[in-house]
């Protein structure tokens, strides 16, 4: 809906039908605008609620820190632990092979 013509209101006297009609058009326009803004307000509140829900799903980790050094040490720590787990696995397999090899050679 387009905004009503204000020129009619400025030129007409308060008792003319054109003036009253212009006021009615303004009231209708404002009512439609109020409903539209109320719907936008509801949508904005829904979006804000959705954003909070998504933020709660994101883990609190130094990998997501804004500080570069913090992120770098977090990545290095994950890398170190991963290498430790892999090395321990390989070491256990190697130890089992040595023990089995020693038993089979006797």
Image (cartoon, rainbow, N blue to C red):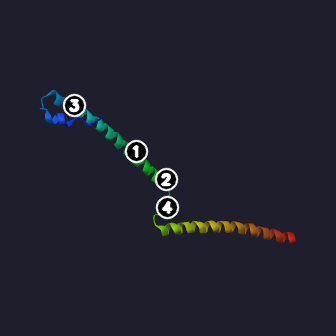
Name which quarter of the figure residue 27 lies in: top left
Disc number placed over residue 10 in the picture, else none = none
| Residue at image mark 4 | 64
Mark 3 or mark 1: name the one nearer the start of the chain: 3
How packed is label 4: few (under 14 Cα within 10 Å), some, or many (20 or more)? few
Q: CA distance from mark 1 to mark 4?
A: 26 Å
Residue at point 17%, 33% (across, down): 8
Which residue is identified by label 1?
Answer: 46
Mark 2 or 3, nearer chain start: 3
**Which secondary structure, mark 3?**
helix
Residues 36 and 64: in front is 36
The C terminus - image quarter? bottom right
Nearest to viewer (mark 2 / mark 1): 1
Q: Report the disc number at residue 57.
A: 2
- Name which of mark 2 and mark 1 comes first in the sequence: 1
Q: Measuring 26% from the left and 35% from the top, which residue is drawn there?
A: 29
């Amino acid at each position: 809906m387009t905004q009503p013509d204000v020129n009619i209101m400025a030129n007409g006297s308060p008792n003319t039908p054109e003036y009253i009609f212009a006021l009615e058009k303004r009231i209708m326009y404002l009512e439609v605008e109020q409903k539209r803004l109320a719907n936008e307000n509801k949508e904005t509140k829904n979006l804000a609620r959705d954003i909070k829900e998504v933020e709660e799903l994101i883990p609190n980790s130094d990998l997501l820190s804004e500080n570069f050094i913090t992120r770098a040490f977090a990545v290095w720590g994950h890398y170190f632990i991963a290498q430790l787990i892999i090395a321990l696995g390989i070491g256990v397999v190697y130890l089992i092979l040595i023990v089995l090899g020693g038993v089979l050679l006797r």
